[in-house]
Image (cartoon, helix red, strand yellow):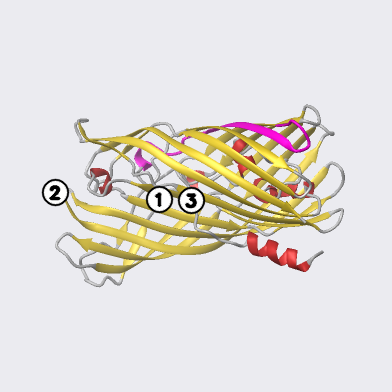
Amino acid sequence: MNKNFLALGLAAALLAPQVAGAEGFAINEWSAEGVAMGGARMFAEDDAANVAYNPASITKVKGEVMKSSYTYLSPHGNYKLYDGAGKEIEDGKNVVHAGWAVGSYYVRQINDKEWFGIGAFPRFAMVSEFERASKASTNAFFSKLNGVSVTPTYAHKFDKKWSAAVGAEINYVGLELQKNSYHPVAQMNVGATQTEGESYALGWNAAANYAFDDKNEIGVVYRSRITHSLEADFKMYPASGGKITADAYGVVTLPDSWDIGYNHKFDKKTRLELKATRTNWSTYDALNISLSNPSVPGVLPSNVDSAKNWSNGWRYAIGLEHNFSDKYAAMAGFAFDEASIPYNGGDFMVPTGLRRTYSIGARYNDKKQTVAVALGWMDVGNLDFAGHATDAYKSAHAYDSFTKIVSISYQRKF
């Protein structure tokens, strides 16, 4: 094997670009083909993005391949706020703050039985922004979670029916939260706060495929939960002027998940994938931040606590792929993502209800290169949630929310 190609592939896969997803923590947009098929892409042939969708399927890659993917997500939505009597006190919309999901992948076939792959892609990320002068800003006016997972993977093909893979996950998160501090007695903003920090943590994944025959195949992927101990900087800018700083610390546990997939080939040109994903969101039970060493003693609280208590949920996807010829193919997909946010655990960080995603795409490939594009539209749904004691409202209603998705991928074989 050409060592220069290997070095280039590893460098590309280890890129950790800043990424920000829209409308929810979970990111499934890891390639244009995956976007086009609603995320139901666990059994693709000769696709380096299998590192992300199903590590056991990197055994379907022949030779050595590299792939890059860029997905643009643009969230839109409206909200209404209510007082304790149920009277509407404000209506508004989010500030359109688009995000990018970037994936880089490298796969090499070692021999007839063994494969190595590595990818860098976001599993969890989000961004949301609202007007700083709004009442919603007392809950959050800017929230961002940058995330990327680097996943070195080893896969083995036991025979014509069985293949399996195991891999490590190096997960990075960068968190930034901004909000206005609201005094419920004085009923006024007393300043703005910013919490900003980052963390690295380790996880793992495992996958297995079983082919019943040439037309039917099933697969299972497990991804472990990952616990981040986040050290951050806390800043408060009082309305009276000046700045107060403190050290902040919090623990965030990203959930474990199971993917179960089924692939059926109608013939050599057309195939259908079904996929169900179980995510244990109950690990996100609270976002509690401890403060210490304030620059002005006695002014800041020692803890800033926020209960979440999300529930576990399922995501269902169906994807169709049809090859018109050896070079051209079309894809379509649909996904349904259950809402996991309870009434007493919602906020303007992630104002997301159930999600329905509709998508289409096309692909061109020759012996060396593959180019794919995809378009998607995500109906985010409505969400009702309660205000906290320090919010300038008692309840909120997010509605008419949607996300535009555009994706492009490029793959090169060596």
* Distance between the alpha carbons at the discs numbered 1 and 2: 25 Å
Q: Earlier in the sequence, mark 2 or mark 3?
A: 3
Tell whether position 342 is magenta.
Answer: yes
The residue that label 2 is drawn on is 185
The residue that label 3 is drawn on is 125
- Using the image, tell me which numbered label, if any, was put on residue 286: 1
Q: Residue at x 65, y 64 (%)?
A: 11
Q: Residue at x 51, y 58 (%)?
A: 227
- Residue 301: quarter of image: bottom left
The span picked out in magenta is 322-346
Q: Are marks 1 and 2 in contact (CB under 8 Å)?
A: no
The amino acid at mark 3 is: Ala
Expressed as whole percent of the image width and height from the top left, the position of residue 380 reads: 44, 34
The amino acid at mark 1 is: Ala
Neighbourhood count class around disc 3 (C-alpha, 10 Å): few under 14, some 14–19, many 20 upward: many
Q: Is residue 21 above or below residue 352?
A: below
Q: Between 374 and 189, which is closer to the camera in this rendering? A: 374
The amino acid at mark 2 is: Val
- Horizontal side of residue 172 vs 211, given as left or right: left
Tell whether position 146 is magenta.
Answer: no
Q: Quadrant of the C terminus?
A: bottom right
Q: Residue at x 27, y 70 (%)?
A: 294
Is disc 1 placed on a helix, strand or loop? loop
Expressed as whole percent of the image width and height from the top left, the position of residue 235 reads: 29, 64
Q: Between 10 and 346, which is closer to the camera in this rendering? A: 10
